[in-house]
Image: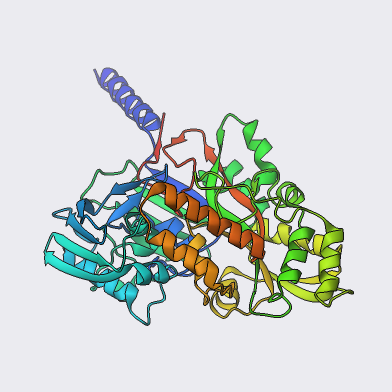
Amino acid sequence: MMLKKTLIAAALALLASTGMAMAARTDIRIGLVLEPTALDPTTAAGAATKEVTYLNIFEGLTQIDQNGAVQPLLATSWTISPDNTVFTFKLAPDVKFHDGTPFTADDVKFTFDRLLAPDSTNSQKQLYVDAIDTVTVIDPTTVEFKLKAPSGNFLFDIGRGAAVIVSPKSEATNATRPIGTGPFRFVQWDKGSRVVLERNPGYWGKAPALEKATFVFIGDPATAVSALLAGDVDGFNNFAAPEAVDIFKANPAFTVAVGTTEGETILATNNKRKPFDDLKVRQAIAHAINRQELIEGAGHGFGVPIGSHFAPAHPYYIDLTNTYPFDPAAGKKLLAEAGYPDGFSTTIKLPPVPYARLGGQILAQQLAAIGIKAQLINVEWAQWLTDVYTNHDFDLTVISHVEPFDIGIYANPNYYFGYDDPEFQAIIAKLNATTDEAQRKDLAQQAQKRLADQAVNGFLFELAQVGVWNSKVEGYWLNAPIEGVVLKGIHWVD
């Protein structure tokens, strides 16, 4: 009898352990190239913050889905006045922030009043300042926005990571201890290493499959490869070592998922600094650029050439890559006409992402061919944000702008490019105030042409999203219509 009981107990233990082994995992470790400088997307610039927080910790009134379409979120529905200037939103009831504070229309008003304030540091502030006149609380679940003019972008813009809703109770500490309404809540940030999130048990929407998510910061390509192969991370949405993709394509334990992004990779130019304030100098630089060489060398074959600041996947896109075709002789001639027959010396500040560091080396060689001697200066991400983005202390830099439909940044003369062109600003003002689709497309194409003609920046290529994942992970976004590694659809399969 004792032997029988022992065998039964052993069998039950074996069944239990087998069941546990077969159960799908509920945790995930995701590699990211850049570490955020802060965790509040309404104050911190840079995609790294939104990669961790967008639709995970924080939510907006609307959301952008993986197809780039606007969907309801904290606002479950809305009405629009006949003249397209008044938007009235009905809010989801019984929503709470992670600290238990109820979400109401007062939080919406607080969020946007804070965003519009003169001392706001929101990276997309100008979008909202130009559009919004007043925000009025009608009742706890109803809020009204009055716009300064009709807007074809408004519902999309309030779905950006820069416009997520924050609570006045926690906004002061969101940079290090973020509190939102999303499906995941913040647990810890080990700076230089990782950010840990866990499933929000009180989430108002559909509960995600994952119980825990850890974002691991790995900027070094070789370390990224090793981490995947060793199982230290379960995937990268944007792999740090595209040159090693073939290793993973040949391994059935992994899935390589190549999609599109909104990332215009550019040789950003300080248009307010000599000699780059001279159109002929910028045109010369444009003629020096061999885009295909950059795609092969810096993107390892992943990427699409661009001739202006616009994503090729967008229906408004036009191919302007031949505005200034690769022609070093033409570049030398233009430099001579600008008063630099022997060229000049400059610097290129490079943030710590592979496409920038590799791209900078290639661009330095291409510029040297027309007489421009470029010193490469490697900077860390926080330093890039301070020196280049905030203080405009740079000549040239290489960066991908991954925000969607962001051509309007060129209408802000105080943006770090320093591009101040009334003609372009007028085009964007019309675009923002237009709701007719055909007219919007025409204006967007006018804007693209103006930037291309003015050679405002060196327009290089559209960054691909090259994801490498454990083959048992599903539900990640193939494409990146907006900045973010959206966790709520990710799950493991047996």
Closer to the camera, 223 or 22? 223
Q: Please count the marks in the image.
A: 0
In this orientation, does residue 373 appear?
A: yes
Indicate the position of residue 203 as horizontal and vertical percent values: 23, 51
Extreme residue toward the right, this view:
342
Q: Please report the residue visible at 49 percent of the width from the left and 49 percent of the height from the top.
A: 30
394 to 456, vertically: above or below: below
Q: Please report the residue visible at 65 percent of the width from the left and 30 percent of the height from the top.
A: 250
Q: Is residue 71 left or right of residue 259?
A: left
Which quarter shows the C terminus?
A: top left
Indicate the position of residue 120 as horizontal and vertical percent values: 38, 77
Q: Please report the residue visible at 53 percent of the width from the left and 53 percent of the height from the top.
A: 445
> Which quadrant would residue 323 be assigned to in this image?
bottom right
Which quarter shows the N terminus?
A: top left
Indicate the position of residue 493 as horizontal and vertical percent values: 41, 31
Closer to the camera, 121 or 218? 121
> Which quadrant would residue 330 be assigned to in this image?
bottom right
Q: Please report the residue visible at 52 percent of the width from the left and 37 percent of the height from the top.
A: 470
84 to 107, vertically: above or below: above
In this orientation, does residue 202 appear?
A: no
> Which quadrant would residue 352 be assigned to in this image?
bottom right
Q: Is residue 427 left or right of residue 86?
A: right
Extreme residue toward the left, this view:
139
Closer to the camera, 1 or 405? 405
- Image color mode: rainbow
Closer to the camera, 65 or 192? 65
